[in-house]
């Protein structure tokens, strides 16, 4: 059997998920990786490769601006280069760690760049579908400027149930911050943004049966 080394960062995420169904981590990716992803997102957006986001999965997809207003570009792991390749290498390492230590059965992942123009939002929802329950963990990595201020809006709000009482937790999209949460458990929303908001968003998924 190959030697196994505990990863303190991954262990923090696992402990957080076990205790509260979500984890907030700064430093999951290096500053260089985050900057490379930011530059890649902006270059592809300027090249008009993004499309208006939709709700539902591919079997039932429709654009509804009253629900969400971001623009997205799905990432192709097979053709990733540079910062995107480093991103997927880290995600693969994280996934293998989760499967080995927690037996989560994660078999695949999907990620996209997301850009919220000023004035857009994503109303409260759950990251699962009636005809597809394969999403296990939701992940978002923020690619905004370092000086993101609360008055810029765009916070991710998680709706938590604490002893039968609902609590709203606001998480600001600070550059490099990663949020991981249980896709089928926590409802959430993106509050209206007052400045362009950048991220990579995706899901770690089990097999669909």
Image: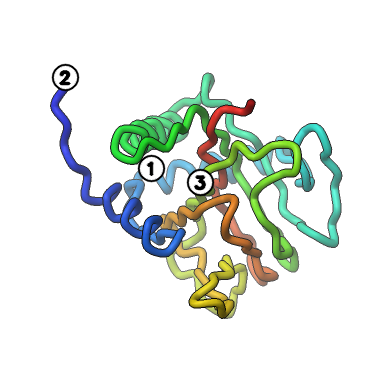
Q: Nearer the viewer, mark 1 or mark 3?
A: 3
Query: Residue 141: x, y in percent?
Result: 48, 51
- Asked which secondary structure carries label 2, the reply is loop
Q: Are marks 2 and 3 in contact (CB under 8 Å)?
A: no
Structural crowding at the residue carrying mark 1, measured as other residues with C-alpha within 10 Å and reported as few (<14), some (14–19) or many (≥20)? some
The numbered disc on residue 77 is none
- Asked which secondary structure carries label 1, the reply is helix
- Asked which secondary structure carries label 3, the reply is strand
Structural crowding at the residue carrying mark 2, measured as other residues with C-alpha within 10 Å and reported as few (<14), some (14–19) or many (≥20)? few
Q: Is residue 177 above or below residue 200?
A: below
In this rendering, position of residue 97 left or right of residue 171: left
Which of the 4 quarters of the picture holds residue 94?
top left
First in residue order: circle 2 vs circle 1: 2
First in residue order: circle 1 vs circle 3: 1
- Which residue sits at x=71%, y=40%? 50
Distance CA(mark 1)–CA(mark 3): 22 Å
Mark 2 lies on residue: 1
Spot the residue most to the front: 164
Q: Is residue 86 above or below residue 154?
A: above
Query: Residue 159: x, y in percent?
Result: 58, 69
The numbered disc on residue 33 is 1
Structural crowding at the residue carrying mark 3, measured as other residues with C-alpha within 10 Å and reported as few (<14), some (14–19) or many (≥20)? many
Spot the residue most to the left: 3
Distance CA(mark 2)–CA(mark 1): 31 Å
Query: Residue 122: x, y in percent?
Result: 71, 61
Mark 3 lies on residue: 137
In this rendering, position of residue 90 left or right of residue 138: left
Viewer-proximal residue, 96 or 89?
A: 96
Viewer-proximal residue, 14 or 70?
A: 14
Viewer-proximal residue, 66 or 209?
A: 209
First in residue order: circle 2 vs circle 3: 2
- Which residue sits at x=84%, y=57%? 65
């Amino acid at each position: 059997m190959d030697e196994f080394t505990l990863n303190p960062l991954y262990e923090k995420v696992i402990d957080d998920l076990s205790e509260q169904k979500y984890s907030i981590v700064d430093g999951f990716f290096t500053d260089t990786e985050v900057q490379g992803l930011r530059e890649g997102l902006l270059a592809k957006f300027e090249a008009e490769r993004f499309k208006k986001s939709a709700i539902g999965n591919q079997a039932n997809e429709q654009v509804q601006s009253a629900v969400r207003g971001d623009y997205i570009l799905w990432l192709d792991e097979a053709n990733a280069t540079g910062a995107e390749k480093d991103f997927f290498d880290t995600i693969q390492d994280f996934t293998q760690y989760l499967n080995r230590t927690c037996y989560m059965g994660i078999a695949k992942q999907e990620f996209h760049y997301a850009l919220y123009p000023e004035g857009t939002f994503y109303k409260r929802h759950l990251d699962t579908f009636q005809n597809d329950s394969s999403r296990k963990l939701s992940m978002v990595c923020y690619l905004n400027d370092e000086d993101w201020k609360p008055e810029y809006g765009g916070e991710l709000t998680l709706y938590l149930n604490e002893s039968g009482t609902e609590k709203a937790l606001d998480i600001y999209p600070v550059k490099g911050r990663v949020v991981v949460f249980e896709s089928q458990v926590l409802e959430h929303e993106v509050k209206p943004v007052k400045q362009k908001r950048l991220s990579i968003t995706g899901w770690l998924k089990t097999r669909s049966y």
